[in-house]
Image (cartoon, rainbow, N blue to C red):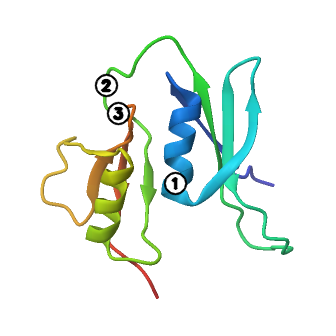
Amino acid sequence: MASRFTELAVDCADPRELARFWCSVLDYEVHDVDEEDGTVTIGPAPDGEDRSGPVPPVLTFARVPEGKTVKNRLHIDVDPTDREQDEEVRRLLALGASHADVGQGDASWVTLADPEGNEFCVLASRRP
């Protein structure tokens, strides 16, 4: 048996604010706030269905004292589901994202950074 990808931990300065941003990006909701250690966990809203397919991972934001200093070695890719890529990029910029240059050159995806500078990519639409 193999392991299953269930959670991505993100170090940050302000877990609540970063969780708010990513909830808006992914249409997630807050699942847990641990006041003691300052972590916030977000994930998809339960829909009451018993799913046998893949379960999207949750994101846990943990407060750390140091800031981000270099390009991420791991990043999130998002794929618009109900709009074209350029519309989604505009929406994410309005939420607080910014354009990021990580040397991607001319690519089919758009590289952005969340409010704390973590890079992520917006893929070209793959809507059915």
Tag 1 or tag 3, which sits nearer the N-term? 1
Q: Which mark is residue 24?
A: 1
Q: Please determine whether, in this image, residue 89 is positioned above or below residue 39.
A: below
List x then y, in percent, for residue 12.
Answer: 50, 26
The amino acid sitting under disc 3 is Gly
The single residue placed furthest to the front in the displayed view is 94
Q: CA distance from mark 3 to mark 1?
A: 17 Å
Q: Is residue 91 left or right of residue 45?
A: left
The single residue placed furthest to the top in the displayed view is 65
SS at mark 2 in the image: loop
Mark 1 crowd level (few <14, some 14–19, many ≥20, 10 Å Cα)? some
Q: Which mark is residue 117?
A: 3
Q: Nearer the viewer, residue 10 or 63?
A: 63
The amino acid sitting under disc 1 is Ser
Please tell me which residue is depicted at 31% across the width and 25% down the height of the picture: 70
Q: CA distance from mark 2 to mark 3?
A: 10 Å
Q: Which mark is residue 70?
A: 2
Q: Is residue 38 left or right of residue 104?
A: right
Q: CA distance from mark 1 to mark 2?
A: 25 Å
List x then y, in percent, for residue 128.
Answer: 46, 88
Residue 26 appears in which quarter of the rendering? bottom right
SS at mark 1 in the image: helix
Q: Is residue 73 left or right of residue 103?
A: right
Mark 3 crowd level (few <14, some 14–19, many ≥20, 10 Å Cα)? some
Q: Please determine whether, in this image, residue 26 is positioned above or below residue 71.
A: below
Please tell me which residue is depicted at 40% across the width and 17% down the height of the picture: 67
List x then y, in percent, for residue 96.
Answer: 36, 44
- Mark 2 or 3: the one toward you: 3
Q: Quadrant of the N terminus?
A: bottom right
Q: Is residue 106 left or right of residue 10?
A: left
